[in-house]
Amino acid sequence: MYLQSLVLLLCALYGSVFVFGKLILESAPPLFVTASRMILAALLLLLYQFIVDRKRFTLQKEHMGPVLIIGITGVYLTNAFEFWGLQYMEAGKACFLYSFAPIATAVMSYLWFSEKITLQKWMGLIIGIIGFIPLLLARGSIEDNTATFLYLSFAEWAIITAAITSSIGWLAMREVVKNRHYSSIMANATSMLFGGLLSLLHSWMIDPWDPTPISDFWPFLQWLLCLTLISNLICYNLHAELLRHFSATYLSFVGLSQPLFAALLGFCFLAETLSKAFWLSVTTVSFGLYLYYKDELKQRAPKKSPSQ
C-alpha cells in the first residue's frame, strides 16, 4: 500500500510539471529552461551523493553507455520536444499526449527485452492507439498558430516524440539501476548533466542571448526552483527507485492518471478547460491499457503445481 501511494504521488507531481512548465515558458525559451533545470539538479544530486555516499560517487565504464542514452533521449530530446510543444497547447492535453509513453514502452520492451506480447495485449495496445484519435482530431485554439503535418500540428508531434524518447530513456534507466546495480541518484545526476549541457549548447546556438534568453528573471527563478525540486529532484529519483519494484510498463500505465492532475491544476492556475474529446480519449486509452496490464498480471501470477 505504501509503494502504491508513492506511485500515485509520482503521477500527481508529474502532472503538475506541465502546468508549472507553461508558467516558466513565459519567461524563457524551452531549451534554456531544460538546460537550467537539468544542470542545477545534476549539481545538487552530485553534491548529495558525494556527501552521503562517497563510495558510490563514480561512473564506471560499463554504465557509460546507458547513461549517455538516458542523457540524450530521456533528458535532452524529451524535454526539448515536450517544452516546445507545451507552448502551443493546454497543459492537460499535452500531459495526455505524453501518456503515449505506455504504448511506446510496451512495444520497445518487446523489442529490447523480448517481453512477450499476447493477443489480448495487442488488442489493448490497438485500442489504446485508437483512443488518441478523438483528441488529435479536436485541435485547440492555441494549436491553430502552428503548422501541421499529416493533419497533426507540429506541437502534437513534438509531445508524442517526447513520449517516445522518454520511454527509451526509462528503459535504459531500468537497465542501469536494476540489471547493473548502479546508484539511481548517480545515474540521474550524470545523465541530467550530460543532457543539460547538450540543451545549453543548443540554446546558445538558436536562442537570443542578450546577455541571457531570460525575459523576466524573478518569475523564471521562482518556477525554475519549483520545477527542479518537483521534477528533477523528486520525480526522477522516485521514478528510478520505483523501477526496482515495478515494471516500466506498469508505471507508465498508472501514469494515465497524470493528465487528470494536470487538467485540475491547469484549471486552477491557468483557467484552462478541456473538451469532451479529452475525456473520451482518456477513457478509451485507459480501457486499452487496462486490457494490456490485466493480461500482464495474469502472466506474472505464480502457477500452482499439480500437487496443490
Image (cartoon, grey):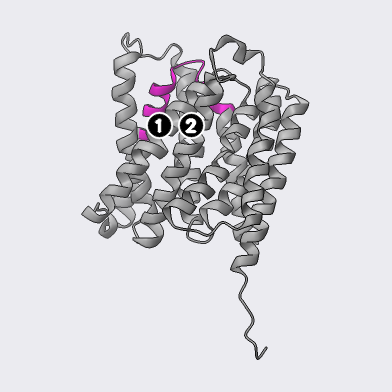
SS of the residue under disc 1: helix
Residue at the spot 48% in from the left edge and 31% down from the top edge:
161
Q: Residue furthest left?
A: 61
Q: Relative to residue 84, is residue 285 depicted above or below?
A: below
SS of the residue under disc 2: helix
Residue named by callout 1: 77
Residue named by callout 2: 161
Q: Relative to residue 115, is residue 271 depicted above or below?
A: above
Give x and y (percent) for residue 111: 45, 51
Residue at the spot 38% in from the left edge and 32% down from the top edge:
76
Residue at the spot 34% in from the left edge and 43% down from the top edge:
69
| Dominant SS type (magenta) | helix
Q: Relative to residue 183, is residue 199 depicted above or below?
A: above
Q: Residue furthest right?
A: 276
Name the quarter where the N terminus is drawn.
bottom right
Indicate which disc residue 289 carries. none
Q: Closer to the camera, 156 or 37? A: 156
Q: Are marks 2 and 1 in contact (CB under 8 Å)?
A: yes
Res. 245 visible in picture: yes
